[in-house]
Image (cartoon, helix red, strand yellow):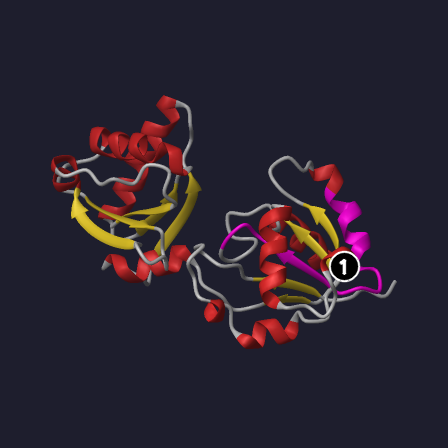
Amino acid sequence: MNYGKLFLIPNFLSDDNPEDFIANMVKRMVHHLQYFVVENEKEARALIKKLGLKLGQPELIIHLLNEHTSQEEVPALLKLLENNDVGIISDAGLPCVADPGSALVALAQTKNIEVIPLPGASSLMMALMGSGFNGQTFTFSGYLPIDKNARAKKIKELESLSHRGITQIFMETPYRNRQLLEDLITHCSGHSKLCIACNMSATKGWVQTKTLQQWKQQKPEFHKIPCVFILG
């Protein structure tokens, strides 16, 4: 079987990113693509339009791979790569990092399909850069448990690791930002340092590192805003 290449295409992080936020080199490399596996079709089509592909929108073949896709459905997506190059697009930032697209990449690797990660912005790395925390030893834990007890246990574990010099990066669904901060204040020492990075790369984006005691005294307005949290 002859397989094409699998391109991992970076997306914009914010609606107000400039057009050149995505490098021209990336646009050149994906200019020929017709087949795409995406997390959200609307977001993907918006990016594809900005990339200026040679094919028009009606000619594109788009398949979904998101949190609703079962593991049993992923192998069928591999058929798109039979004699075709395919692009993976996430909602924002880099695909396959805290993103369902990694399931298809894992399968492609077992078939020796050439996987080409293309350079782009990562809110996780931008947050780490701006935090002032250890950038040599760190862990990304993704989303924390929703269950109250499991969440408290995980937070204490992350705090303990951060006190040992291992920076702890994690995320939350934007509408739960306030609750996560309250949980961190409740379960961590007031002296522990927390970085909150909101709307990375956006015009009104910001990165601030404070003790949890300071965050408790001056809570930010960040409800429903994409954020990265870091204990260090």
Picture quarter containing residue 73? top right
Residue at which label 1 appears: 111
How many labels were placed on the picture?
A: 1
Residue 133 shows up from this direction = no
> Which residue is pictured at 22% across the width and 41% down the height?
220
Q: Position of residue 45 (x, y in %)?
A: 63, 54
Q: Nearer the viewer, residue 137 or 19?
A: 19
Q: Nearer the viewer, residue 142 or 53?
A: 53
Left or right of 151? Residue 56 is right
Residue 30 in the image: above or below residue 191: below
* Residue found at the far right of this picture: 1
| Magenta residue check for 161 | no
Q: How crowded is the residue under tag 1: few (<14 C-alpha within 10 Å), some, or many (20+)? A: few
Dot 1 falls on a residue whose secondary structure is loop
**Residue type, mark 1 in image:** Lys
| Magenta residue check for 81 | yes
Q: Position of residue 193 (x, y in %)?
A: 19, 46
Q: Nearer the viewer, residue 200 or 19?
A: 19
Residue 195 in the image: above or below residue 122: above
Picture quarter containing residue 69? top right
> Which residue is pictured at 49% across the width and 59% down the height?
12
Picture quarter with the N terminus: bottom right
> Which residue is pictured at 44% across the width and 66% down the height?
18
Left or right of 88? Residue 61 is right
Q: Position of residue 187 (x, y in %)?
A: 23, 30
Q: Position of residue 34 (x, y in %)?
A: 75, 62
Residue 181 shows up from this direction = yes
Residue range in magenta is 74-92
Residue 41 in the image: above or below residue 224: below
